[in-house]
Image: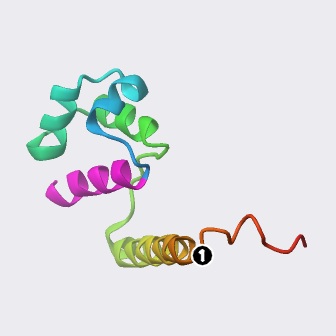
Amino acid sequence: MTYFLQQIKNRRLALQLKQSDMFMRTGISRQQYQRIESKGNPRLDTLELIAKGLNSELLLVPAEQISQVKAILNAAHRADSTEDDDLIDNPWRDIFRDNE
């Protein structure tokens, strides 16, 4: 469960959301959401609310395919952070990009 809770937190941070922002997205109070992220054992319906609030969905992945799914997600995360680094190095990239 710890890995799963960390994934929830990582997704929220990737969306640049605070725990208090989750109330408007899920209806879950900041205190309850904080408890879920830190050590919670949320019910399935609560997880569905959180997933929806994070523009995500819950998915049951067969155990034999977990490593493949994690590799894909990690590669996507690395690509996103590389793109962010490029934007930091060149903030005008999107503005002065050649129109294709």
Segment tinted magenta in the rendering = 1-14
Q: Which residue is mark 1?
A: 90
Which quarter of the picture shows residue 43? top left
Circle 1 SS class = loop
Is residue 4 located in the magenta-colored stretch of the structure? yes
Residue 41 place in picture, x, y as percent:
14, 39
The N terminus: image quadrant:
bottom left
Q: Is residue 62 above or below residue 26?
A: below
Residue 23 place in picture, x, y as percent:
33, 25
Which quarter of the picture shows residue 10? bottom left
Identified at 37% across, 65% down, the residue is 62
Residue 42 in view of the camera: no
- Image check: 71 left or right of 44? right
Identified at 17% across, 27% down, the residue is 32
Identified at 35% across, 48% down, the residue is 12
**Majority SS type along the magenta span:** helix
Q: Nearer the viewer, residue 72 or 31?
A: 31
